[in-house]
Amino acid sequence: MRVSRETLTEVEALAQAAGAAIMQIYHAPDFAARIQVQTKGDDSPLTEADLAAHHIITAGLQRLSDAQLSALPQLSEESADIPWRERRHWQTYWLIDPLDGTKEFIKRNGEFTVNIALIHKGQPLLGVVAAPALQTIYSGAREIGAYKDGTPIAARQDSAAPTLKVVGSRSHPSPDVQDYLDKLGKPYELVPMGSSLKLCLVAESKAHLYPRLGPTSEWDTAAAHAVALAAGAEVTTLDGEALRYNQKESLLNPWFLVR
């Protein structure tokens, strides 16, 4: 399946519109009152901003100029209660995280994103990652390439680098990651970052490696995964298999590496 540059541009605009809605709340003088944090079933936070972005994206995808893509099913973090007996038959669908890094949003450190991905046969074909507080957008698609703010990016291997730059979670540090890094046998510099921006740093060669040895959901990674693949990076399980989507009832990812 192929996607067009026009579709990528439309999805970029949609992610930016969702980001603008998030930023209205982010900059509101009554921010603390507006977020009204609720707790979802997995103990992750939910705010008014998550829901506002969700509604903009889900409605906007249904208005895409490509009628085939606009009619596809959607799976969003905020509407994820679609039974496996239905989901297992999906070959192509939209996978959305309206506000990835809600904890970063609540902390107001800017490291949160809007994630929109197109999945086909378990693989991400297209992805857009908008970081509205940073005024940055990453996008990518198979056979089109990867971009940051419209400029092409690539994940270049730098085997001669004396120190590995390893990106890690700012809000979810893991002792398993520390054990993994201790076994690398090479000096490393840890680059903390929130949300799906971690994968994007590898995609643009600002980091060499991102080991995720902790829980993530499929909507957390799919859009940035598409960007990373389009930039030439690898995203694999610890066994070296490609990270895939909608292959099981659980929507949790296995541990994975981006390099």
Image: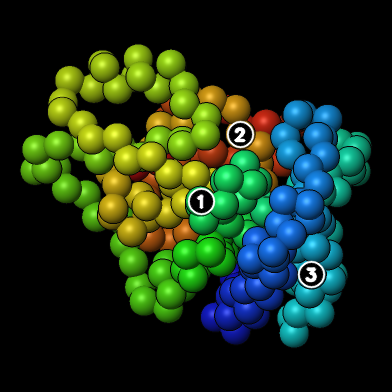
Q: Residue at x 62, y 42 (%)?
A: 103
Q: Position of residue 173 (x, y in %)?
A: 47, 26
Is 89 on the left-hand or right-hand side of 232?
A: right
Give the image quarter of residue 187.
Answer: top left
- List the residue tagged with mark 1: 109
For badge 3, the amino acid type reads Ile
Residue 180: assigned label: none
Q: Can you identify the residue that label 3 sits on?
A: 56
Q: Which dot, 1 or 2, sits closer to the camera? A: 1
244, 216: nearer the viewer: 216
| Point 56% across, 66% down: residue | 132
Q: Are marks 2 and 3 in contact (CB under 8 Å)?
A: no
Q: The residue under label 2 is which amino acid type?
A: Thr
Name the amino acid, label 1.
Asn
In primary-sequence order, the first of circles 2 and 3 is: 3
Residue 177 coordinates in the image, percent (x, y): 40, 22
Give the secondary structure at mark 1.
loop
* In the image: residue 156, left or right of residue 126: left
Compared with residue 223, is residue 140 higher up or lower down, i.e. above or below? below
Given residues 115 and 111, the one toward you in this image is: 111
Question: What residue does disc 2 label?
Answer: 216
Q: CA distance from mark 3 to mark 1?
A: 23 Å
SS at circle 3: helix
Disc 1 to disc 2: CB gap under 8 Å: no
Instruction: Indicate the secondary structure of the residue bearing disc 2.
Output: loop
Q: Nearer the viewer, residue 103 or 65?
A: 103
Quadrant showing the N terminus: bottom right
